[in-house]
Image (cartoon, rainbow, N blue to C red):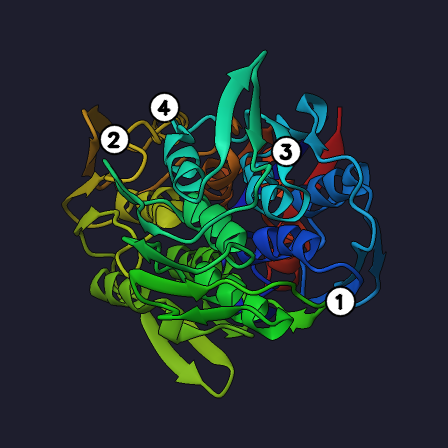
Amino acid sequence: MDLFEIKGPVQLEGSVNISGSKNAALPIMASTVLAPGKSIIRGAPNLADISVLAKLLRSLGAKVKSNAGSKLRIDASVIDNPVGHYDTVRKMRASICILGPLLARCGQAKVSMPGGCAIGDRPVDIHLRGLRGLGAQIHLENGYIVAEAPHGLAGTDIFLGGPFGSTVLGTANVLMAATLAKGTTVIESAACEPEIADLANCLNKMGAKIRGIGSPRLIIDGVDSLSPVEHTVIPDRVEAGTFMAAAAITAGRVELKNCRLNDMMAVVDKFSGIGAQIEPTDNGCVVSRDGPLKPADITTQPYPGFPTDLQAQLMVLLALADGNSVITEKIFPDRFMHVAELNRMAANLRKEGPSVIIAGVKKLIAAPVMASDLRASAALVLAALAAEGTTIINRVYHIDRGYERIEQKLNALGAKITRKTI
């Protein structure tokens, strides 16, 4: 098991290239199941989660090859084993997005209930409700979702809203299944995230007929078949936001290349409000900070609101702000496992229900800490960059799931991170 040893404080300077979006690449990889033949997905980051889904696709019968330059070649000519086994699916929640494509192509699917980060309850009932609306017969059996559509899927009107807003993976699942359904499907309260728009654009390249992309109402006219595709995934806005936070917390100056600010307006607004300067460039931005960090009240929301996947990183910044702040988590109300670890580093954080009250401190102090999930891991790395002394972060396999070579990228900017195997 690996750990990070991080010496701080440092001031980051230089430029960094933002990788392709993990959250866009995963459902796009799953979508190739719908198109018999050889597809090419460019820009997929070299991450543990990408490897897990590649392994899952191979178990279904597809052939997956990765090449230099973040290019995946997926040959889905044969899909003859429509089963998502527990041993693979338990490693990553996004594995559930094979359910819709398998059901649409094979007329049946058996997929284990998914695993992933321990960030609170994330049921798949909305996924199943949407697929049932398309005509699937679904039941649970020994921890597996068993779905059948012996007579094919049929278009209908489906409402996908839930208690915490739209479901991103649920939208992806129903959207992919609907492309091959007979008739027209209307998905109301669809997730509007850029990653869903990227998936929809990719599906249209395959021959799907999807309208309303980027809006909460998607209209899908079913087609008889889809064709293989060549597609480049969008940049990772969460990685970009994490490097914005790294520049801000170290009072540095970092140029982000391959960054789409149009996908990050809420992030730019909040970061600017707490004291970061963000200057747009032709293909990204330059992030810097000269003055003190300012307090703020933040509420996570579905896109285009502030993303839950940057909540932990923003919390570290506010832990050093001059005043009191409040962060309220409206997507995953229990996503606060990083709070106790940041308090070990001399932060002053107090959880109150779905909110955390943050009293800004003058400095953070190094300590041994434990990574609990992907984004919490990133927050601890940010804290270590600004803390006095040497911080040990254990269980960094979490961060490898979502950040491509993060220690190498940060070290190129002036960080002092050593990866060690214990």
Q: Position of residue 396 (x, y in %)?
A: 62, 34
| Residue type of the residue flagged with mark 4 | Ala
Looking at the rendered image, the disc whose residue lies closer to the viewer, 3 or 4, is 3
Relative to 16, 73 lies left or right: right
In terms of secondary structure, where does tag 1 sit? strand
| Residue type of the residue flagged with mark 2 | Leu
Do the residues under discs 4 and 2 have CB atoms within 8 angstroms? no
Judged from this view, the residue extending furthest toward the top is 142
Between 350 and 231, which is closer to the camera in this rendering? 231
Q: Is residue 118 above or below residue 142?
A: below
Q: Which residue is mark 4?
A: 340
Q: Which residue is mark 1?
A: 40
Sequence-wise, the earlier of marks 1 and 2 is 1
Around disc 4, counting alpha carbons within 10 Å, would you say few (fewer than 14), some (14 to 19), or many (20 or more)? some
User: What residue lies at 45% left-to-right and 69% top-to-bottom?
Assistant: 210
Q: CA distance from mark 4 to mark 2?
A: 8 Å
Q: Is residue 178 above or below residue 260?
A: above
Determine which of the numbered discs, if any, sits on residue 109 in the image. 3
Q: CA distance from mark 2 to mark 3?
A: 45 Å
Between 354 and 24, which is closer to the camera in this rendering? 24
Around disc 3, counting alpha carbons within 10 Å, would you say few (fewer than 14), some (14 to 19), or many (20 or more)? many
In terms of secondary structure, where does tag 4 sit? helix
User: What residue lies at 35% left-to-right and 70% top-to-bottom?
Assistant: 212
Q: CA distance from mark 1 to mark 3?
A: 24 Å
Sequence-wise, the earlier of marks 4 and 2 is 4
| Residue type of the residue flagged with mark 1 | Ile
Looking at the rendered image, the disc whose residue lies closer to the viewer, 1 or 3, is 3
Sequence-wise, the earlier of marks 1 and 3 is 1
